[in-house]
Image (cartoon, rainbow, N blue to C red):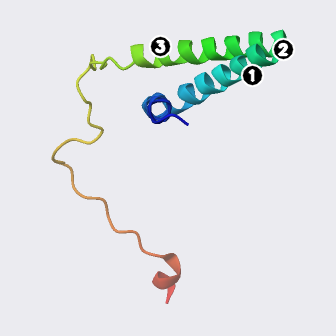
Amino acid sequence: MNPLFARFLRSVYRKEPISGFILILGATDALIGGFGGKSSLLSIGLFIALLGIIMRWRQSSKKTPVKPSKPARYLLPPSSSREPLPLLVNNSKRQK
């Protein structure tokens, strides 16, 4: 295998593994179908490769940071002004 081709495949796969796998799978099917004279495998391979390209494009467009519109809301107040809750005691120890 050509070292440049191996480096290209590694770079495609490392950026987005799922879409890279689908893209490489589709390109391989298209190459096998094209050289083997199987038009159905060629068309399926082209469709799968196109699907991988679309997935990669959508994943790269979603990487824009989303700014939170509301500030963080805390569930408990920072300091409690109420008395602490009483300790729970097991009833079997009380009866002894």
- In the rendered structure, the answer to whether residue 74 lies left or right of residue 46 reads left
Q: Secondary structure at mark 3?
A: helix
Classify mark 1: helix, strand or loop: helix
In the image, what residue occupies the spot 26% across and 20% down? Answer: 70
Residue 37 screen position, x and y as percent: 82, 13
Mark 2 / mark 3, whichever is N-terminal:
2
Q: Nearer the viewer, residue 12 or 74?
A: 12
What residue sits right under mark 2 in the picture?
Answer: 38
Q: Tell me: residue 81, above or below residue 47.
A: below
Q: Residue at x 54, y 27 (%)?
A: 20
Q: Say which residue label 1 marks.
A: 32
What amino acid type is highlighted by mark number 1? Ile
| Closer-to-camera residue (4/59) | 4
Residue 55 position in % (x across, y down): 54, 17
Q: Along the horizontal axis of the image, is 22 left or right of 29?
A: left
Q: Position of residue 58 (x, y in %)?
A: 48, 14
Distance between the alpha carbons at the discs numbered 2 and 3: 29 Å
Residue type (three-letter) at the residue carrying disc 3: Trp
Residue tagged 3? 57
Query: CA–CA distance between discs 3 and 1?
Result: 25 Å
Q: Are marks 2 and 3 in contact (CB under 8 Å)?
A: no
Number of numbered markers: 3
Q: Secondary structure at mark 2?
A: loop
Q: Is residue 25 left or right of residue 17?
A: right
Circle 2 Cα neighbour tier, 10 Å, few/some/many (<14 / 14–19 / ≥20):
some
Q: Which of the two discs, 3 and 1, sits closer to the camera?
A: 1
From what the image shows, is residue 5 above or below residue 43? below
Quadrant of the image occupied by residue 53:
top right
Sequence-wise first label, 3 or 1: 1
Observer-nearest residue: 66 or 16?
16
Q: In whole angstroms, how far apart are the C-alphas of marks 2 and 1? A: 8 Å
Question: CB under 8 Å between callouts 2 and 1?
Answer: yes
